Image (cartoon, rainbow, N blue to C red):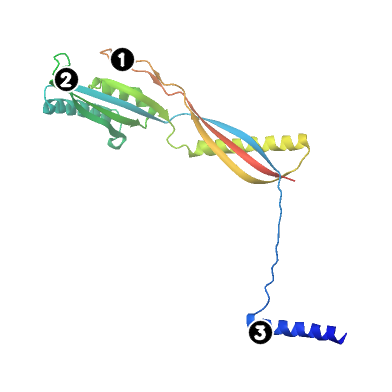
Amino acid sequence: MKNFAAGIVLIFVLLFAYTKLAGPLPLSVTSTITTQTDTFSVEGVGKVSAPPDIAVVNVGVAANGTSVKGVQDELNRKINAVSEAVKRAGVKSEDIQTSNYSIYPQYDYQSGVSPITGYQASSNLTIKVRDIDRTNEVIDGATAAGANQVGGISFDVDDKAKAQNEAREKAVADAKQKAEDAARIAGFRLGRVVNYQESFADNRPPIIFEKAQITDSREPTQVEPGSSEIVVTVTLSYQIQ
């Protein structure tokens, strides 16, 4: 018994001496936390009809000549005339942008040696019409001044933020109603929203352009803007309680 007690005392003495020399004994604690949360996701859609208030029109001119200088001068004369006509129709200078300017040679491939027979040049203007009611007038003014290419006509809403917010509100309300109906029918309770996603779509009608070809006709152009539809789709993810 005395030997056992002496052994216990010796062990404590040795431990005391070790901690003084090597520091305290390390203590390791492992903690594991397991969580499991059930979620439920639902999609909602909101749509708002937004009448366009601006038009974007692309017009162009082409010129042919026997020299680069000649064709360039002719092209510049024509495109400047178109630009001035568009300005007279109420479009500001900052809303007229050159979107293409090119000059390239033409070859005679019939002779076998492909000599240059002349040059062809073209230039395009992208025009933003802020007074949408004057779109037809702008097109007719451009063609009367020499534009022989018209295309890429589109209508848009200059400030979409208001329409997008309205569509977003409708989409969220639609998603919430669907979630509440599903919870009532399936017998569970909705917790807080833990995730939100949204996407936008802009559905525009096809452009109606009655003057398909540029001719000397005096009939006025009729371009109808129609109406754009802003569509927002949202996905709400709820915790299930």
Above or below — where is 215 with respect to 196? Answer: above
- Point out residue 177 in the picture as x, y percentages from the top left corner: 68, 36
Lateral position of residue 72 relative to residue 47, left or right: left
- Going by the numbered disc 3, the residue's amino acid type is Lys
Q: Pointers 1 and 2 in contact (CB under 8 A)?
A: no
Q: Residues within 10 Å of mark 1 (few under 14, many from 20)?
A: few
- Going by the numbered disc 1, the residue's amino acid type is Gln
Sequence-wise first label, 1 or 2: 2
In the rendering, which numbered label is found on residue 107? 2
- The residue located at (17%, 27%) in the rendering is 77
Residue named by callout 1: 213
In the displayed image of the protein, which residue is found farthest to the right?
1
Q: Nearer the viewer, mark 1 or mark 2?
A: 2
> What is the C-alpha distance between the residues marked 1 and 3?
100 Å
- Going by the numbered disc 2, the residue's amino acid type is Tyr
Element marked by disc 3: helix
Residue named by callout 3: 20
> What is the C-alpha distance between the residues marked 1 and 2?
27 Å
Quadrant in which residue 94 is drawn: top left
Sequence-wise first label, 3 or 2: 3
Q: Nearer the viewer, mark 1 or mark 3?
A: 3
Q: Residues within 10 Å of mark 3 (few under 14, many from 20)?
A: few
Above or below — where is 5 with respect to 118? Answer: below
Q: Nearer the viewer, residue 27 or 99?
A: 27
- The residue located at (44%, 37%) in the rendering is 159
- The residue located at (44%, 29%) in the rendering is 52
